[in-house]
Image (cartoon, coloured by chain):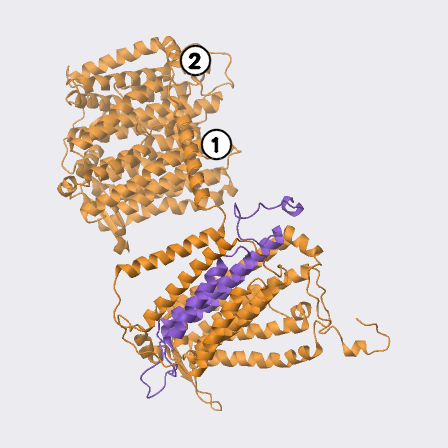
Amino acid sequence: MDNAAGFLPIIAALPFLGALFPGLMIQAGRNTCAAFTAAPTILALTLLLLCAPAVMRGEVLTFGINWLPSLGLNVNFMLDGLGLLFAGMILGIGLLIILYARFYLSREDPMGQFYTYLLLFQGAMVGIVLSDNILLLLIFWELTSLSSFLLIGYWKHLPEGRQGARMALTVTGLGGLAMIAGMLILGNIAGSYDLSVILTQKEAIQASPMYLPALILILMGCFTKSAQFPFHFWLPHAMAAPTPVSAYLHSATMVKAGLFLMARMWPVLAGTPEWFWIVASTGLITMVMAAKIALFKDDLKALLAFSTVSHLGLITMLLGLGTKAAAVVAVFHIINHATFKAALFMTAGIVDHEAHTRDIKRLGGLRHLMPITFTIATIAALSMAGIPPFNGFLSKELMLEEVAHTHWIGPHWLMGAVATVGALFSVAYSFRYIAHVFLGPKRSDYPAKPHDPGFGMWAAPAFLTVLVILIGVMPMTFAGDLVRVAAQAVTQAEPYVNIYHWHGLVPAFWMSVIAVIGGAILLRLHAPLMTMWNATPRPEAKVMFDAVTRAATALSRAVTDGVHNGALTRNGAIFAVAVIGAGVLGYLGGGMAAPTREMLPVTVLPAIGWLLLVLATICLVAFHRNRFLALVLMGIVGLIVSMGFVYLSAPDLALTQISVEVVTIILLLLALNFLPRETPVESSVARRMRDAGIAVIGGVAVAGLTYAILLRDFAAESISVFHLANSYKGGGGTNVVNVILVDFRGFDTYGEIIVLGIAALVIFALTETVLKGPGGRWLSQWKADRYAEAGDRHPLMMVVATRVMMPIALMVGAYIFLRGHNQPGGGFIAGLIVAIAFLMQYMASGFAWAEARQRVTYHATIGVGVLIASVTGIGAWLAGRPFLTSDYGYLHFPPIEEFEWATAMAFDTGVFLTVVGAVMLALNSLSSMARRSGETVNIMPMDINPALNDAPDEKEA
Amino acid sequence: MELLFASAIGLLTAGGLYLVLRLRSFPVIIGISLLSYAVNLFLFGTGRLVVDMPPILQKGVETYTDPLPQALVLTAIVISFGMTAVVVMLALGSFLSSREDTVNIGPETPPEQPTQENEA
């Protein structure tokens, strides 16, 4: 038994895994592709059947994996009677659809895509019916909306297909959102998101004041999915899909998902007046209204679409009645509807496929041309009409019996009367499907010569009609047990299931007779009624839907444009004011403790530094229009900040800051080469005063906050204590900052080097785009507006000096890197230093010269760096430890003194390489712009080469 | 000392804010850099200021500087370089493509003159 429960996640996963194959297998031919689609379905169905015996005995199989227990989201699966019924329908009819679609789709249709979508959809549906956790259920629920969107819009070239798909997604997606809210409320009331718990909490849920909101929200989801009035309009538009999709989605699966959920929640939500009024009324209205419309549709699929809406309404109404007997009938009709409706859709598809039209007005007399299709369609349609001995008759009789005893509004007989009218229309359109398509005289003007299709195409509907007959003749043998276990799951009680044909001369019998006779009369009068119908104005759902969508689009565009008008400065100002406002609010909301720390004394050195910083900043703001001067002043600020770090006992930071400073300034200088030299005066004085006001208030606020923090001790003990205590013991390094970077917070660093690498690649990509676009064309003609260049771009002394310095700089880099674990230094700083060493060559000897000597690409450097860091991290798994756990030890080779090794060192190497690669790629991208601008490239290391220039025959270069 | 530190951060913030609100890309970049200094210093300051404390573990020493803010700031410095570089590139790209280095599109600046490059 427990073994069977283990199949549940596999059953749910199989269609998803299977979805990988059709796209690959289509290369091997259409039959192979279909076979590979059928295989996971067959396998899942087999596993389901292995689970079936236990479920039929009344057991509930459960399987659980904790996923996000803190959120109450667990991968819990459950299989009870209801789940078995639905999963069986989804997989069984799915299999028939796969067979049917193999012959239905033409050579031009991408079949691999179709089967992939179909399996995705199938997996999502199976997931819904097997979920025990409602959050998991919601995920699958949304997946059905998405995958059905793909299926409905499968014929991408048809505008109807695309619009229908969008409409279906919008309506069912919106309902899904409402349902998420409803489910969250429900889970909150019940104290768990597991169905097995929720279903036991009936009293608590129905007594809660949040019951009604939760009910309405959940029903929104169900009604939109199951196309109940007033959300029914999407379903007919979804008929633009290929017929196999319609047959699958609208007989057994997607639209039944809403019914499934209502049935699933029936034990806790049903039985209240609210439930009765909302659900039963909606169902009744939908049933009658849709049946009436169906009668007047000339498109075969539209007729079936509205009949589907009508039957869904019928089932919804039965569930809404809230009695156990009605729930049993609902379950029974779900089975019956799936069988005859899938068969009917398939026959409609066959007619369309063979006659090249599904317009009823252009059809008729097909019974001679397509006898097999005629037989199948007739049996299924008679079942839909509720004619004995087919299965539709049984459930319709039971339904009429139930409503005859139910008091709705007004007189006691009203609900029965309305339902009879619905049944009457149902009979009429079912008869019409037979009479106007297959009966009547043979015509001579079919768009194509109709004939019965091959066996592969009619096998699936034929199989279903066999079920229709078998269940109709011997209901207890073929459906009784399934109905019993499913109804048991719905009602959470042992139901009384006894389906038989003759109930005596009960009201239901007379209602049925009225319906059949009335339906026949309606069909007789169809032509004049149709004229009347066409003459009456009706609201058109698509027009309204389009108007609402347009209005919503216009509204959101207006809001977006209003909030975001393209003015970055305005957004910046609003942001700054908002942040300051939030800070002030926070400050006013609480008190401040008394200072607990003494101020450090001010000595001369920091006072000078402070003065320089203040002067540089003020000058920077005052003279920012001179951009070159601004850069110089920014360099001063950066330098003082670095020195501040040294003074305040942070050597690692000082080293980092100063090396970053160098590369930043070089970068900005390179950029400034192409930008205007001056910033023009544009903003008004008032505007500048406003900005200055914001800036001063912001500055004062930050200064105050910093001052307040600096004078107070930590409110709680800092985790730094842990780092200090464990740095050497656990990480094997005495430089705690570096150990934090490569060990304690290694994951952060890992993320950061990836971000850095991405930033560099973004820069590279941007450069390429700009150079390929108008910017590049402009650059290549750009000459003017340059600074007067120095006569000698690559001075001899500088070239020589940088050459000599190169190995030294590299050695310093290596030294800084190696000592990093125990002394100030490490991968970040070493990377920057090495990058600067390379940069010096670029500056002194020119881009071309340096690049010609560069053996590795910077992209590769970044990639290798991240890879090394990843491999180091993964290495910890081999030792059975979490990602990035480090290890260290000591090595001793006799002549050299003992030295330490640490896996953190390998990680730091990754950091080092990424930093080098990222910095160099960024600067290299900028320099490639300079080359595009026609800046001459020197081939020689220097412009003035003494060896050449001094030779008597050579002209000056 | 704390007063000097706090006022320096305040000044850097004010200068940065003012420049970020300018209309051309270059001052905005400089402003972002100033704000980066201020934020990094602020983060560093949350470890409280200490002078002449060892940052490296040594035998017989009990009190050290707070290593955690330092580690955080170290990566922040490197990341802010990456960010600055991207922003510089964006500014440069937009200037080269449109011959304009304004940061605003919309009513605050005159509409862009369509040039040949833009139409291409």
Viewer-closest of A453 and A800: A800
Q: Position of residue A912 (x, y in %)?
A: 50, 72
Which image quadrant is residue B46 in? bottom left
Q: Position of residue A604 (x, y in %)?
A: 44, 83
Q: CA distance from mark 1 to mark 2?
A: 26 Å
Q: Secondary structure at mark 2?
A: loop
Viewer-closest of A557 and A138: A557
Upstream in sequence: badge 1 or badge 2: 1
User: Chain A rendered in what hue?
Assistant: orange
**Mark 1 falls within which chain?**
A
| Residue plotted at (48% across, 32% down) | A105
| Residue plotted at (40% across, 73% down) | B5
Q: Amino acid at mark 2?
A: Gly
Q: Position of residue A826 (x, y in %)?
A: 46, 76
Local crowd at mark 1 within 10 Å, few (<14), some, or many (≥20)?
Answer: some
User: Chain B rendered in what hue?
Assistant: purple
Question: Is disc 1 in contact with disc 2, using a CB cutoff of under 8 Å?
Answer: no
Which image quadrant is residue A58 in? top left
Please, is residue A303 above or below residue A669 in the view? Answer: above
| Mark seen at residue A365 | 2
Give the farthest residue toward the front.
A685
**Mark 2 falls within which chain?**
A
| Mark seen at residue A105 | 1
